[in-house]
């Protein structure tokens, strides 16, 4: 059971890292929207490819007021809720398995 507990701990840490990377990429995406970068740059294209699926559902909602798009804020909130839920569930499973 100890091995399974450590597996779930490692999985929780992996999800925690994944969500932190997504937060970081969303922040970069917001900054890029202020600067108007070269859309043919490979790094910019990668950031857009990763963050577009996260932001696309929120862009369909009326979250723009006065030229400001609030969809990244809603995406941050949803990612935060998902991160807390998933990581806490995985740590709870690890704790119950004896880790």
Image (spheres, rainbow, N blue to C red):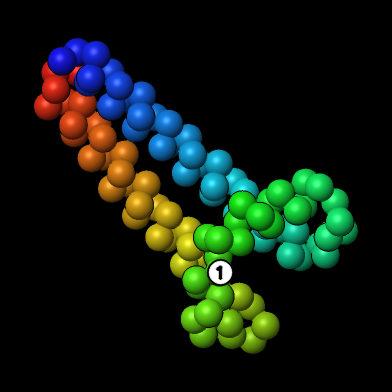
> Is residue 46 toward the left or the right of residue 77 in the image?
right
Say whether residue 33 is visible: yes
Give the quadrant of residue 55. Answer: bottom right
Q: Is residue 29 above or below residue 12?
A: below
Q: Residue at x 68, y 57 (%)?
A: 48
Image location (x, y in percent) of residue 84 = 32, 46
User: Secondary structure beneath disc 1?
Assistant: helix
- Residue 32 to residue 24: above or below: below
Q: Is residue 36 shown left or right of residue 25?
A: right
Badge 1: residue crowd in 10 Å (few <14, some 14–19, many ≥20): few
Residue drawn at x 40%, y 60% is 78
Which residue reaches farthest top?
2
Can you say which quadrant of the picture contains the N terminus?
top left
Judging by the rendered image, the residue that carries numbered circle 1 is 56
For the point 86% across and 56% down, the residue is 40
Q: Quadrant of the C terminus?
A: top left
Percent from the top left, x then y, of residue 91? Answer: 24, 32
């Amino acid at each position: 059971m100890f091995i399974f507990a450590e597996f779930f701990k490692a999985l929780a840490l992996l999800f925690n890292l994944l969500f932190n990377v997504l937060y970081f990429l969303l922040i970069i995406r917001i900054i890029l929207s202020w600067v108007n970068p070269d859309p043919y740059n490979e790094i910019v294209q990668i950031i857009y490819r990763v963050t577009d699926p996260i932001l696309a559902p929120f862009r369909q909602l009326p979250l723009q007021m006065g030229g400001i798009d609030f969809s990244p804020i809603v995406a941050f909130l949803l990612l935060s809720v998902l991160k807390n839920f998933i990581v806490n569930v995985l740590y709870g499973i690890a704790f119950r398995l004896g880790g």
